[in-house]
């Protein structure tokens, strides 16, 4: 090392400019370096995302030789507390409602009767509240299915799975449903949040099939029907929470689902 070597210390980082001149050196802050080094991947990711094909449900069922009883819709947390009221209500999640209601109607018209709605139904003292703040406590309107789904004429076909953590399969009634529905081979996973409950749900179903060496199970996640919440660094600092960048985490977790064999599609038609 020459005498010109200078250690990189936090004091010379600047969060906004990206580069700092120190003597004859130009130091790049770690975020800029990460972004620059990851640019080829991010370019690939954006191209991959925009290139996702649509999923023609009726045609796919025919091609796979599936009847209506072999198909299920799995919905994560389409409840008031993520769409309309409370600490975690998000406009991005609310915006999913028309597409998800459309899928429910389309599926029902095709004869599908397997609708599983996993819903936060928290104990007032849920450990999860340490991370996310109180939300969707059992017995409150936040924990109720959104009216757009609850008012569907076939809502009595819904299987509601109350849950007290991100997973719909841990200490819930879901495994009982799964045992009774071994004929289901095609699962469409919708709802929120891409990186939290949807991820847990799609991965559980994929891992369950993989572990059983079942090659016939297909898990499909339509991008138009899943999303996650956004919490800026500034707002997070103000309320004492961890920030959450939806524009980054949504595509990253879609990618991660695809990496593990979940079929990520654009829309269902
Ligand atoms: Zn929760």
Image (cartoon, rainbow, N blue to C red):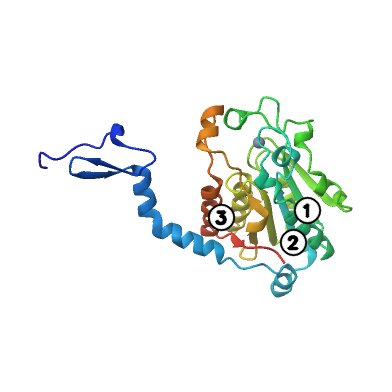
Measure how far apart labels 2 and 3 are at the Cα level.
21 Å
| Mark 1 crowdedness (10 Å alpha carbons): few <14, some 14-19, many ≥20 | many
Measure how far apart labels 2 and 1 are at the Cα level.
9 Å
Mark 3 lies on a secondary structure that is helix
Q: Residue at x 52, y 64 (%)?
A: 48
Disc 3 vs disc 1: which is toward the camera?
3
- Which quadrant would residue 52 be assigned to in this image? bottom right
Disc 2 vs disc 3: which is toward the camera?
3
Tell me where residue 261 appears, x and y as whole percent.
Answer: 56, 60
Q: Residue furthest bottom?
A: 63
Labelled disc at residue 71: 2
Disc on the earlier residue, 3 or 1: 1
Tell me where residue 255 appears, x and y as whole percent.
Answer: 52, 56
Q: Which residue is mark 1?
A: 115
Quadrant in which the C terminus appears:
bottom right
Disc on the earlier residue, 2 or 1: 2
Left or right of residue 106: residue 126: left
Q: Residue furthest right?
A: 153
253 relative to 130, above or below: below
Q: For ligand 1, give the image quadrant.
A: top right
| Mark 3 crowdedness (10 Å alpha carbons): few <14, some 14-19, many ≥20 | many
Q: Which residue is mark 3?
A: 254
Disc on the earlier residue, 2 or 3: 2
Residue 19 in sight here: yes
């Amino acid at each position: 090392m020459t005498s010109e070597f200078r250690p990189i210390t936090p004091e010379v980082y600047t969060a906004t400019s990206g580069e700092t001149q120190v003597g004859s050196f130009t130091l790049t802050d770690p975020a800029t370096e990460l972004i620059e080094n990851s640019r080829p991947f991010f370019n690939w990711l954006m191209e991959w995302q925009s290139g996702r094909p649509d999923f023609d449900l009726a045609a796919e069922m025919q091609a796979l030789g599936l009847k209506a009883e072999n198909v299920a819709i799995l919905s994560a947390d389409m409840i008031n507390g993520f769409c309309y009221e409370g600490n975690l209500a998000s406009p991005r999640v609310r915006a999913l409602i028309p597409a998800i209601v459309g899928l429910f109607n389309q599926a029902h018209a095709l004869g599908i009767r397997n609708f599983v709605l996993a819903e936060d139904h928290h104990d007032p003292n849920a450990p999860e509240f340490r991370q996310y703040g109180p939300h969707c406590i059992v017995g409150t309107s936040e924990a109720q299915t959104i009216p757009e789904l609850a008012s569907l004429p076939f809502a009595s076909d819904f299987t509601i799975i109350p849950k007290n953590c991100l997973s719909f399969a841990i200490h819930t009634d879901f495994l009982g449903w799964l045992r009774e529905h071994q004929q289901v081979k095609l699962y469409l996973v919708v709802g929120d949040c891409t990186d939290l409950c949807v991820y847990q749900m799609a991965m559980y179903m994929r891992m369950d099939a993989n572990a059983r060496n079942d090659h016939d199970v297909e898990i499909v996640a339509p991008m138009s029907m899943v999303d996650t919440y956004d919490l800026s660094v500034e707002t997070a600092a103000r309320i004492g929470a961890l920030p959450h960048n939806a524009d980054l985490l949504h595509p990253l977790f879609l990618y991660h689902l695809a990496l593990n064999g979940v079929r990520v599609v654009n829309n269902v038609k």
